[in-house]
Image: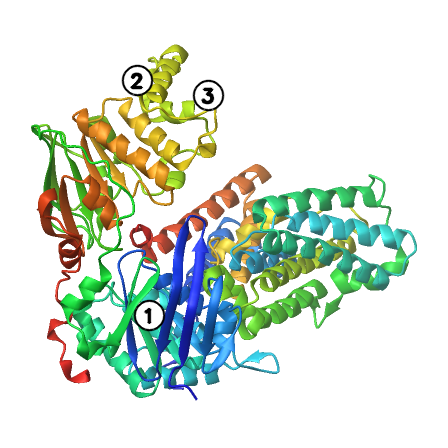
């Protein structure tokens, strides 16, 4: 392999890095602006707080990024999160051991992911419809888990569980941050350095070419949906650990936050493009906006409008850039 | 050990309504470039798709490297060493060259991709082919010709011994063709068998060793290229039996209706000039990819044209979008009826009304039902469309009747020029004849008919004047009395001599 220039050049040589660095610049600008609006924004306490706020968005962002890169979408993420929260909390209040509850919860989330994958890959359902269906189903399961009530407190027996998923600290770093970092490393490795990851990009880039090259397209799409459901499930467990109970509406709208984190971070809704480092930055921008606007005294409604607009602009930019660059329209005529 | 790497014998393949391959035999030796020649629809691509496992043959034997093979799949064909370089390139444009070369066969150690190793081997195979591309380049960023070379590199990396190239030079410049030929010669010297499908006969002299000619799904002949002359090749390619009778009618040529001057739109529409008179059908003939459809699209305003004047009944008309063409009275019956011509899920009534809503609605935009049903009744009766009623769903009509609705909806609004793009594709003989009668009726009513078709007999049988196009240019215009199949084909293959400059040393 030929030697390639200085480290900065090497950094830019990584595909998708240019976009990530641009967005990072935006993140820095945002932080500067917010710190001017309210000096407390950059206080140690708020930074620690922010780091925990980012975690759920980052994890569901990983979910959505995996699916988006295959050229599909997962709308069931928020409901799977809610289902995970309710199932785990219900099991624990009914006296099932916390770790067994965790295992059962993860399995049930993976079942939803499997259903998503099979519906989209094998049954050829449009991903929008398939996951809209499972989104409703998963929310229904969340409601039925404890007979249409939020659960009671999961109790002291579950303290280890709560520490592991939310309250614990290692070397001063909150456990959810460590957990998220670990999961990010695993899934970043899977996406960037393994055959499965390569196939996820290939399928999103050109499904027919992938099939003709011997890629198992169905398996690849199913794996992406499994990863998606898994990460959403973990966030559900964190939600249970945070509040110490199960809430039926947990994770409401999170599928949209997941899209936001992904596309702001440069993951293309058209498939085949994006890296998980971008998703980190995207999730950070989402959290900084929420947190910063709150600090600046903006009401929730304004925050929603701002974030929604940013999502639309990001996707618009992606489509404009892509269609400008790879326009094959005129070739397809004859 | 047989001298052939591929032997196909008595191969038969039918599609609904078409006998695509009729008892075809084909042989390929190692270290030779075999040109597979034939007119549009002769069965060349179908035969190669059978070999590549894209289609399953109905009958016949296929032997690859002396091994008889049963039903082929793309994967199985690949494992046998057969690679197709597709006309429309099949690449993951967001992935890098190396990633595409190893797609589906990635190297990995303990689950970890060996990117360096793949990079190195990609470099090796690219170097071997003397292709100057960095394996890390994203495929979407390189030219079509380079993408094609990457496909060849990918095939070689997969140990392909038999390469099938379908019109590989159609999108390339002279320099790029030269590079491609250099690669083909290299592969030949390494003992690969290469099937080369092309309409560009003038290219053959630079690389081809033998030719196989097909016509109408049948094997016609195979010979050494050295023994063949251009005339022999063309003679064998044409001479399709004309099975159908064409109901051509004579009616006097009237005044000039429509004129196109210096129309340019991209590479496939270059300086197009022609006129169309009342009472005549003008046919546009040309090979696949000659730019026929592009010309109709540029006239109709679907694709932007760079320059050109269009005159209708002596008055210049400006067409920038389809709506302008329709307003001025130029309408198009597109090639793909189901996709572009009809809303197949709507009723016949709705389809006929759709382009005429401006005539049917009052100022507030409310459809006048009475006027609508009157228009629909007239159209159905006027074109004798066979249906159960105006509410019948358009998609359930037969192909011929669908075509009548497509044309009928336009003529409900007094159109003056009707462009037919491949109106008879994929429909049975009876329906074809109905469409011929339809065109004749338009002609008798003083409507100018422009008729684009890849079926040469059809154009010769129906048109009063035939315009031959090649590579987006008009290469010849013949009145009906002078047009013969041989002549039309000859002019349809008048490519600009891109490969003139090539040295013939490789032969």
Q: Position of residue B323 (x, y in %)?
A: 26, 31
Chain for numbered disc 3: B
Q: Is residue B375 left or right of residue A84?
A: left
Disc 2 and disc 3: Cα gap in Å?
22 Å
Front residue of this view, candidates A16 and B325: B325
Which residue in the structure is indicated by mark 3? B389
| Mark 3 nearby-residue class (10 Å; few <14, some 14–19, many ≥20) | few
Front residue of this view, candidates B251 and B370: B251
- The image quarter containing residue A261 is bottom right
**Is residue A156 placed above or below B229 in the rendered structure?**
above
Residue A13 in view of the camera: no
Which residue in the structure is indicated by mark 2? B359
State the colouring used for the structure image.
rainbow
Which residue in the structure is indicated by mark 1? B165
Q: Residue at x 35, y 34 (%)?
A: B403
Q: Secondary structure at mark 3?
A: loop
């Amino acid at each position: 392999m030929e030697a390639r220039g200085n480290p900065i050049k090497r950094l830019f040589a990584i595909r998708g890095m240019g976009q990530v660095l641009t967005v990072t610049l935006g993140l820095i600008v945002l932080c500067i602006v917010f710190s001017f609006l309210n000096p407390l924004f950059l206080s140690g306490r708020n930074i620690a707080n922010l780091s925990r706020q980012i975690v759920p968005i980052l994890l569901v962002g990983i979910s959505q990024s995996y699916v988006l890169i295959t050229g599909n979408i997962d709308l069931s993420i928020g409901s799977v999160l809610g289902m995970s929260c309710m199932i785990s909390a219900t099991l624990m209040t009914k006296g099932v051991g916390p770790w067994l509850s965790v295992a059962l919860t993860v399995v049930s989330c993976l079942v939803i992911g499997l259903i998503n994958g099979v519906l989209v890959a094998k049954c050829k359902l449009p991903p929008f419809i398939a996951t809209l269906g499972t989104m409703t189903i998963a929310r229904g399961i969340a409601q039925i888990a404890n007979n249409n009530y939020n659960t009671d407190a999961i109790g002291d027996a579950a303290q280890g569980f709560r520490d592991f998923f939310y309250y614990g600290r290692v070397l001063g770093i909150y456990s959810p941050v460590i957990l998220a970092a670990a999961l990010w490393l695993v899934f970043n490795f899977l996406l960037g350095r393994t055959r499965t990851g390569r196939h996820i990009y290939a399928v999103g880039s050109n499904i027919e070419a992938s099939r003709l090259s011997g890629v198992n397209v169905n398996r690849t799409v199913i794996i992406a949906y499994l990863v998606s459901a898994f990460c959403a499930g973990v966030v559900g467990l964190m939600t249970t650990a945070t509040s110490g109970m199960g809430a039926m509406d947990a994770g409401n709208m999170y599928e949209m936050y997941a899209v936001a984190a992904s596309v702001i971070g440069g993951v293309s809704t058209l498939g085949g493009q994006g890296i998980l480092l971008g998703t980190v930055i995207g999730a950070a921008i989402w959290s900084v906006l929420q947190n910063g606007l709150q600090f600046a005294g903006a009401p929730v409604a304004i925050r929603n409008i701002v974030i929604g607009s940013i999502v639309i602009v990001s996707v618009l930019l992606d489509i404009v850039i892509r269609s400008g660059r790879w326009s094959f329209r005129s070739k397809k005529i004859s | 050990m047989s001298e052939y790497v591929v032997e196909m014998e008595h191969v038969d393949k039918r599609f609904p309504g078409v006998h695509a391959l009729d008892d075809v035999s084909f042989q390929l030796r190692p270290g030779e470039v075999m040109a597979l020649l034939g007119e549009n629809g002769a069965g060349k691509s179908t035969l190669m798709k059978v070999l590549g496992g894209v289609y399953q043959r109905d009958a016949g034997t296929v032997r690859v490297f002396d091994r008889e093979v049963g039903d082929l799949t793309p994967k199985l064909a690949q494992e046998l060493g057969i690679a197709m370089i597709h006309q429309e390139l099949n690449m993951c444009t967001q992935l890098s060259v190396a990633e595409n070369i190893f797609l589906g066969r990635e190297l990995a150690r303990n689950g970890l991709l060996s990117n360096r190793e793949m990079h190195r081997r990609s470099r090796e195979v690219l170097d071997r082919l003397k292709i100057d591309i960095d394996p890390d380049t994203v495929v979407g960023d390189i030219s079509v010709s380079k993408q094609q070379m990457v496909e060849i590199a990918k095939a070689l990396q997969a140990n392909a011994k038999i390469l099938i190239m379908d019109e590989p030079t159609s999108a390339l410049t002279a320099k790029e063709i030269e590079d491609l030929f250099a690669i083909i010669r290299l592969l030949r010297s390494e003992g690969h068998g290469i099937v080369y499908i092309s309409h560009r006969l003038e290219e053959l002299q630079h690389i081809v060793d033998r030719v196989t000619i097909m016509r109408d799904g049948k094997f016609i002949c195979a010979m050494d290229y050295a023994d063949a002359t251009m005339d022999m090749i063309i003679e064998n390619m044409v001479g399709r039996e004309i099975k159908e009778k064409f109901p051509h009618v004579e009616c006097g040529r009237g005044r000039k209706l429509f004129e196109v001057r210096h129309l340019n739109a991209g590479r496939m529409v270059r300086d197009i000039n022609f006129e169309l008179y009342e009472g005549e059908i003008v046919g546009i003939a040309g090979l696949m990819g000659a730019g026929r459809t592009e010309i109709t699209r540029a006239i109709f305003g679907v694709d932007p044209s760079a320059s050109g004047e269009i005159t209708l009944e002596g008055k210049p008309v400006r067409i920038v979008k389809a709506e302008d063409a329709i307003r001025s009275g130029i309408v198009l019956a597109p090639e793909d009826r189901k996709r572009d011509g009809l809303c197949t899920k709507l009723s016949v009534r709705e389809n006929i009304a759709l382009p005429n809503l401006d005539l049917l609605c009052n100022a507030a935009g409310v459809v006048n039902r009475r006027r609508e049903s009157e228009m629909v009744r007239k159209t159905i009766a006027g074109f004798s469309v066979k249906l159960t009623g105006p509410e019948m769903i358009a998609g359930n009509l037969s192909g011929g009747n669908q075509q009548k609705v497509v044309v009928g909806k336009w003529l409900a609004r007094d159109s003056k020029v009707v462009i037919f793009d491949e109106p008879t594709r994929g429909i049975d003989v009876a329906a074809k004849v109905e469409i011929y009668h339809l065109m004749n009726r338009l002609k008798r009513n003083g409507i100018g008919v422009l008729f684009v078709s890849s079926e040469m007999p059809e154009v010769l049988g129906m048109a009063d004047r035939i315009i031959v196009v090649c590579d987006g240019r008009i290469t010849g215009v013949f009145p009906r009395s002078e047009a013969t199949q041989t002549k039309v084909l000859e002019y349809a293959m008048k490519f600009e001599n891109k490969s003139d400059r090539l040295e013939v040393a490789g032969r």
